[in-house]
Image (cartoon, rainbow, N blue to C red):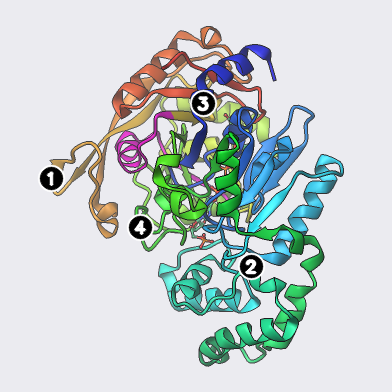
Amino acid sequence: MPEHLNQKLENIFKPYKTIVVAGGNWGDEGKGKIIDLVMEHYDLAVRYSGGANAGHTVKTPQGVKLVSHLIPCGLAQHKTCVMGRGEFFDARLFSEELAAAKQALGGGLPEIFIDHMSPLWTPWHSLLEGWLELSRGNTKVGTTGKGIGPLEGIYKLRVSPVAGHLLLEKEELVTVLKMLYGVMLPILEKVRGNIPAPESVAEELLSFLPQIGGRITDTSFVLHQALQNGKSLLFEGAQALGLDSHWGTYPFVSSGNSAAAGAAIGAGLPMQSFAATLMVVKTLPTRVGSGPFPSEMWEREEAMFFAKNHSELFGEGAGRAEFLSSMLKKINQKQATAPEMSQYFQVLGDERGATTGRGRSVGFTDIPWLQYACRINGPKWLALTRFDMLSGVKSIPVIVGYKYQGRLLQPGQLPPPWEMSKVETIKEDWPCWTEDISGVSEEKDLPQGAREFLSRLEKAVGVPILLVGTGPGREAAVVRGVA
Ligand code: GDP
Ligand code: IMO
Ligand code: MG
């Protein structure tokens, strides 16, 4: 990490013993990269929500790419990792992730704690999720298939097994599982003939105990003690405000408390423990699965299948460079349609999900959405990722207002989710810049157009942009001079 970046970050974060890093769009904002950048200045990495549905990518200076789903991505910096009570626990996926991390990071891992009351996944959760999605027909949520809805729902019904139950004797675990089995059997029998029995589910879950057993504890007490001992904590959000089960676009949401406020419930610390929130937002937001997305450039299904149907354009694909240069030309001649712009940015950013590989649909920078997200999350700063995506684009539409029922909504105001599709977006064309800013790490090295874009955006949203992502790596970021 370049020393000038490190020093600036040290000065900024030192006064904040704790920080919540939360997503502001619909996920995949680059939270992993920003957390990795800031993590050096904190002692513990704490997940407070979501589960294996998350996919957080970290690219280390050694070129290692680590995608973490359950374990906080502070793991990449060998920080003590805490998986809080607000996070759903999947023993099988945890064991797989642990093995992959050992290989990627070369052996010794830091301490990892799992909360003893985290809702515990069973194969029945996934069967139920399959049935829920199927029965919704064409209003399916388009989930990641990790059983997240049932994990939250069953917990709230008060019949859920929890991670700590893995420490019980096998017969005791079977008794716990039988309660859930009894509740679910009438539904599951309608879905499928062959339902695994509690005994075999217990056996499978217990087979992961060697990797898990010693890590299960009361994590809120671990965090309480860490704070008492003067340690600093980074709370790692999963998903994003648009996917929060209360403040997102319900029912097209995930099932956890992805908002910044979820950190208090999910980690079990009093509200005054949270010093500041850094909200991560994507220059061009993306969405996978179903649900409202006012700034979207193209049809969701089309965009999600584009990556699958045009694999030659993605990653190291042979047709990529030519496609990008001809499309950029078209964009700059103002001849590109919105779907073509979507295709350009999807290919440029390799917009494919880190958990499911589905194509991510791309939207324009959306100021009214960000004003809403800031109203709920109350961030002290924004981290704007993937700013490099606009390099070479002469100008781009930016959403500056939402019109609903014939009138302009006030900053921070949204219609109910079921009316979101009726919102008319007001666009303005904002100048960008021609230079490539990939890897730029000093504000003075950003072209004039880029600097003007940033100040215009932060002024409109009303929250300072502290960090600007200029590439996937830890060092590809600008730390701006804001208080
Ligand atoms: P998360 O779920 O919010 O952690 O985000 P993901 O890891 O799912 O997706 C973000 C993707 O963007 C990853 O492939 C990152 O490596 C990449 N990324 C993050 N920040 C930047 C950036 O500033 N520029 C570019 N080009 N890529 C970035
Ligand atoms: P990270 O942490 C993007 C989306 C799914 C679906 C909806 C519900 O990497 O940003 P779920 O499986 O949670 O019940 O699916 O939420 N979704 C995400 N989209 N990034 C994520 O996580 C997501 N986690 C869930 O696509 O629309
Ligand atoms: Mg992700």
Secondary structure category for the residue under label 1: loop
Q: Verify CB contact (< 8 Å) between mark 3 and mark 4.
A: no
Q: Nearer the viewer, mark 3 or mark 4?
A: 4
Q: Amino acid at mark 3?
A: Phe
Ligand 1 within 8 Å of the CB at mark 3 = yes
Q: Nearer the viewer, residue 416 or 358?
A: 416
Q: Amino acid at mark 2?
A: Ala
Neighbourhood count class around disc 3 (C-alpha, 10 Å): few under 14, some 14–19, many 20 upward: some
Q: Position of residue 373 (x, y in %)?
A: 35, 41
Q: Position of residue 383 (x, y in %)?
A: 48, 29
Q: Amino acid at mark 1?
A: Gly
Separation of marks 1 and 3 at Cα, in angstroms? 33 Å
Q: Nearer the viewer, mark 2 or mark 4?
A: 2
Name which residue lies at 50% across and 50% down: 239
Separation of marks 2 and 1 at Cα, in angstroms? 51 Å
Q: In the image, is residue 293 above or below residue 146?
A: above
Q: Nearer the viewer, mark 2 or mark 1?
A: 2
Residue 198 lies within the magenta run: no
Where does label 4 land, which residue? Answer: 246
Q: Which residues are magenta?
A: 359-381
Q: Verify CB contact (< 8 Å) between mark 1 and mark 4.
A: no
Separation of marks 2 and 4 at Cα, in angstroms? 25 Å
